[in-house]
Image (spheres, rainbow, N blue to C red):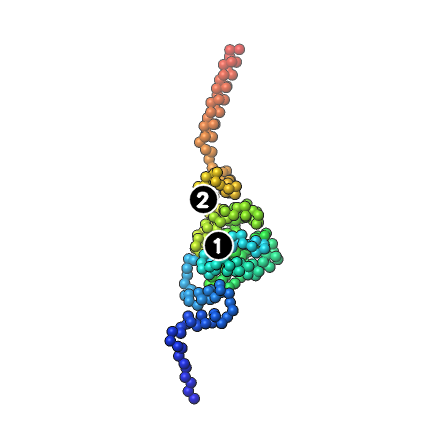
């Protein structure tokens, strides 16, 4: 008994098979795009390690969100993804109000690491093939940078008051999905230097306080300005003159 194997029709490739399989399943558009990307990529290393950075409040509402690729192109899909992500992760935030270590979850073909603090949650999103340690390092840099900017008062109210500086810090950490900096102290210093270029009349209260905070750490080690030396010299001359005048009056008496 012989068995013959039928050849696929002309033009039928692995890409068609992947598309047919996706059409037969009930999945979200974001998951479908992620699966197609996984089917075609060669797992080559890339600089574009970050897909998105999110900060959500304790009710799942968006405080800050930055997406760096086309996995979630529309605002509607981003909102749906954020709602689903919050639903999967807010239970851990209920158990421990402040998580000192990063947690990890796989959602819609993406790797998400997150960390909560009082009433806000920080998220860093990467592909399913991304190294979790890299994502965790970026998450730690984000959290520590925000903590230094807000003077360790990391909660929703203070974060909203300094949201413009927090956005600058996020841009210093990651740009276009490429990790630029992982040292929180360097991020805070760069943000403070960038605010120095803004005229004082156009700066917000948060920007002025950040500059004062960054300058306070180094003011103790700075040498006094030249004007203080002049004041000391003038004071010495005044004391010498006063002593000479007192001696002259005493000698006449």
Q: Nearer the viewer, residue 149 or 167?
A: 167
Q: Residue at x 42, y 85 (%)?
A: 3
Visible in this render: residue 38? no
Q: Residue at x 51, y 13 (%)?
A: 249
Look at the numbered disc 1 and give the secondary structure of its residue: strand
Q: Nearer the viewer, residue 45 or 1?
A: 1
Closer to viewer: mark 2 or mark 1: 1
Which dot marks residue 194? 2
The spot of residue 184 in percent (x, y) is 49, 49
| Crowd class of label 1 (few under 14; some 14 to 19; many from 20; radius 10 Å) | some
Q: Report how far apart the C-alphas of labels 2 and 1 lie in the structure.
A: 20 Å
| Crowd class of label 2 (few under 14; some 14 to 19; many from 20; radius 10 Å) | some
Can you say whether 137 is above or below 40 in the image?
above
The spot of residue 217 in percent (x, y) is 50, 41
Q: Quadrant of residue 227?
A: top left
Which dot marks residue 66? 1
Look at the numbered disc 2 and give the secondary structure of its residue: helix
The spot of residue 53 in percent (x, y) is 49, 55
Q: Furthest residue to the bottom? A: 1
């Amino acid at each position: 008994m012989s068995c013959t194997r039928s050849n696929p029709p002309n033009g039928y490739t692995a890409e068609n098979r992947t598309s047919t399989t996706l059409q037969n399943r009930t999945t979200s558009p974001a998951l479908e795009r992620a699966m197609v990307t996984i089917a075609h990529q060669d797992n080559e290393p890339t600089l574009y390690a970050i897909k998105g950075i999110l900060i959500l409040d304790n009710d799942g509402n968006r405080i800050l969100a930055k997406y760096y690729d086309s996995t979630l192109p529309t605002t509607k899909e981003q909102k749906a993804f954020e709602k689903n992500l919050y639903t999967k992760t807010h239970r851990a935030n209920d158990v421990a109000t402040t998580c000192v270590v990063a947690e990890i979850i796989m959602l819609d073909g993406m790797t998400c690491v997150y960390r909560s603090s009082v009433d806000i949650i920080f998220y860093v999103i990467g592909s399913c093939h991304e190294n979790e340690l890299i994502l965790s390092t970026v998450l730690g840099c984000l959290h520590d940078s925000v903590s230094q900017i807000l003077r360790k008062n990391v909660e929703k109210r203070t974060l909203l008051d300094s949201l413009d500086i927090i956005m600058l810090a996020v841009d210093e950490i990651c740009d276009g999905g490429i990790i630029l900096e992982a040292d929180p102290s360097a991020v805070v210093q760069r943000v403070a230097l960038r605010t120095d270029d803004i005229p004082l009349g156009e700066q917000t209260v948060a920007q002025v306080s950040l500059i004062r905070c960054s300058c306070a750490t180094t003011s103790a080690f700075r040498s006094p300005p030249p004007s203080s030396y002049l004041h000391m010299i003038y004071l010495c001359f005044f004391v010498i003159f006063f002593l000479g005048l007192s001696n002259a009056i005493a000698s006449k008496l």
